Amino acid sequence: MNPEDVRIRYNVSVADKRGGDYEHKRWFSSAVARAGFFMTKITIERHAALSGKHIEHYLELGPGPGTWTKLFLERDKASAYDLVDISSEMLGLAQENLSAYSGNVHFFEKNFLEFNEAGPYNFFFSSRALEYFPDKEVLVKKIAALLVSGGEGFVITKTPKYAINKLIGRKTSDFHSGQVDPKALTGLFEAHGCTVVGVYPVTFNFPLFRAAPLNRALFAIFSCLPLNPISQFFSESYAIKFIKR
């Protein structure tokens, strides 16, 4: 996988779904999708807060249609927000959905590893974008370099499903092969000047059954606890919260 593949894939995907409301199809088109939205929203609200501090300069990698950006904008409307996405179609969708906040939101169509237009930042956020970067160490180093000392970050990414996939005989597609183990990602942030203060499960998918009640039940049991071997087995995604030293 390379950045050009990601750009093309999402440009085509968004263009195909845009007329039918991409955000609705992604998060609200089924009970399972709505459960995923609920779990992600609660996790962000519970764990991603800046300990009451003002977000002076916010950076987001891969904002999608701006679904989660809205949570931060509603919390701290006076901040400056920079959103970076390699897909022009996805970025255009975010611009449409965040038009009410246009005065303090800036959009950059860019490969994140080549992004140097602004900063530094005191908060970094990204949801489900890290898995598309083949070299995680280069990416983490870039994130850390853009943060001020004491700046915080919250990253959500897919949980590798090695055990489950092996159990049910499912092969991970090349496009989704960049998933990274929580311990490995924690080690990268620690190695590049950040202190990891928490690793949490975010969304859950019960194996073999696409059932929203089961997913919500797992979330109710495990969501208040740090990620552990059991919750990692059932989690579809996890989050890392860190502070730049």
Image (tube, rainbow, N blue to C red):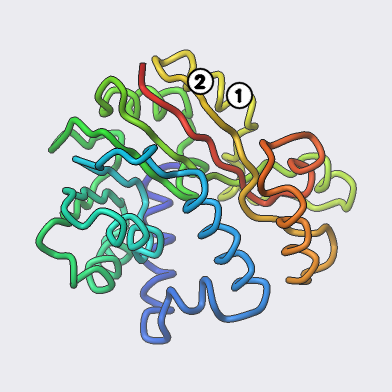
Residue 143 lies in what quarter of the image?
top left
Residue toward you, 198 or 11:
198
Q: Which residue is mark 1?
A: 184
Residue at the location (37% across, 60% down)?
Answer: 71
Residue 12 vertical placement versus 81 (above, below): below
Residue at the location (37% across, 86% down)?
Answer: 19
Residue at the location (62% across, 40% down)?
Answer: 200
Residue 78 in percent (x, y) is at 16, 53
| Side of 158 relative to 130 (left or right) | right
Local crowd size for mark 1, using a 10 Å CA cut-off: few (<14), some (14–19), many (≥20) = few
Q: Are marks 2 and 1 in contact (CB under 8 Å)?
A: yes
Q: CA distance from mark 2 to mark 1?
A: 6 Å
Q: Which mark is residue 188?
A: 2
Residue 132 in percent (x, y) is at 48, 44
Residue toward you, 217 or 82:
217
**In the rendered image, is residue 1 in sight?**
no
**In the rendered image, is residue 231 in sight?**
yes
Residue 223 in percent (x, y) is at 67, 49
